[in-house]
Image (spheres, rainbow, N blue to C red):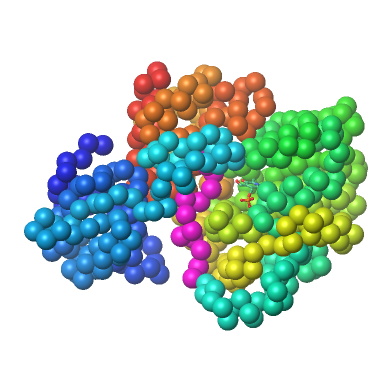
Amino acid sequence: MPVSQRIGTNALINMLGDWSLGRGVPLHTKLAEAMLDAIESGVLPAAATLPAERALARSLSVSRSTVTAAMNDLKSRGVLESRQGSGTRVVGSSPAQDPGATVLPGILGRGSVPVGAIDLAASVPADARALPQVEVDLAALLRAGPRHGYTPAGLPALRLAVAERLALGGLPTELENVLITNGAQHGLALALNMLTNRGDSVLVDEPTYPGIFDLLSARGLKPIPLPRTGGGIDTAELRRLVNEYDLSLAYLQTSVHNPTGFSMDDWQLRSLAKVCDELNLTVLEDLVLADLRYDGSRPTPLAGRVNHASILAIGSLSKLGWGGLRIGWLRAPHSLLERLIRARLSDDLGSSIPSQVIAAGVLASFDQVAKVRQETLLCRATTTSEYLARELPEWGLTIPLGGLSMWIELPGPYAEPLAQVAARHGVTIATGASASVASEADHFIRLCFDRPETQLMEGLDRLVQAWRAVC
Ligand SMILES: Cc1ncc(COP(=O)(O)O)c(C=O)c1O
């Protein structure tokens, strides 16, 4: 969007979008965050001069002190500066956007994000804003657990909080079944290390979470794709593949599914549990997105439905809260958990105590955090699908039931060219091939909409331009 150097009040108000929505945050903070989003997304460019505070306050129908507080906040972060006689200017984006921080490999989009581009590829929360306020001072650290700070199985209080959360979700769990990990990726790595040998094959739902491919290939393991059918899994096909390849291990997302956003219902989970029991299949059940169904429902996971199949359930706070916490968990039967803890001990001696303290704080306000996340994500999913349906009716869209992303079918094998042209237009997307080994993967893209609204809209606008250029 071309923006003149001196920004008028109306132009700025358009750039800020619905900045005042939401409860529980002071108005000046919301205004500062909306301005920061506009600056970070490039909508409000560096060197632009802002309107006078008084005029802005009048047009926004807020007090002048609200505008002053927001501006002061951004000045203290080095994003705005005031010069005598020439008003307030945009200096640039916040330090979190420095070029070093924008090179994101692997699961975060399979490539690098060009400096200044809007990242709609990485299916992760944009920042830490979903976290509740949790004090982590020295006293909290001294209170938290062993004074030396090494907790190979995790802080007991956090293990208990996770166990209680899982039990509330229909999966009776004791503290002794829970291992705190450095995110779900770490939990998956520990489980694969324990359960596989180089050269083994592992059943993987298809399409799937891209990070599983990194984990499998690093261990010399072969993925055997099990196509998803609508929201669920074709159990007859599962049985066939297990028998044909003599498989004993599967990685399955049974709750909200990355990348499609579908979720299995009770009936599908029940028949899956039955087949897992029959085949005595061990399953790594990925529940990372389980709390992000927009309707707030949580069907009982597979681990709570099987009789004797061994299920290792894996969760994390990365999508509910923030990936930077690096806190996840593994729920496993006692015997397996003991072995996992020993393996973990040799790995890294335990997760960070400050992160575990914050994680316990997130779980203490779980209901509120989850509700706000579900509402926000539904709102972003709706905005994204409405915008794309209007601008690009030829794209195949389905509104997800939950999660951070949308799996979009293009009218041909254009994912790769679109991703390349989109990057040149200043927006990144994930190609279907990053989440799938199927040959039709190049008809699909994954788009993450978990971004502040101004950034998302600018990103979508750039994507539409990129598609028109490709066409
Ligand atoms: C389905 C799924 N599983 C696991 C992970 C890894 O999560 P974490 O950041 O907790 O390691 C992700 C992150 O994108 C994911 O989407």
Instruction: Give me the residue at 82% from left, 51% from top.
Output: 311
Quadrant housing residue 218: top right
Q: Quick check: is 125 in the magenta stretch? A: yes
Q: Considering depth in this image, is 154 or 254 the residue closer to the camera?
A: 154
Q: Is residue 198 left or right of residue 450?
A: right
Residue extent of the magenta highlight: 121-133
Decide: is 50 above or below 168: above
Q: Position of residue 132 (x, y in %)?
A: 50, 68
The quadrant of the picture occupied by the N terminus is: top left
Quadrant housing residue 422: top left
Q: Is residue 238 visible?
A: no
Q: Considering depth in this image, is 439 or 229 the residue closer to the camera?
A: 439
Q: Is residue 124 left or right of residue 54?
A: right
The quadrant of the picture occupied by the C terminus is: top left
Quadrant housing residue 262: top right
Decide: is 48 above or below 59: above
Decide: is 39 above or below 149: above
Instruction: Give me the residue at 39% from left, 53% from top.
Output: 95
Q: Is residue 409 visible?
A: yes
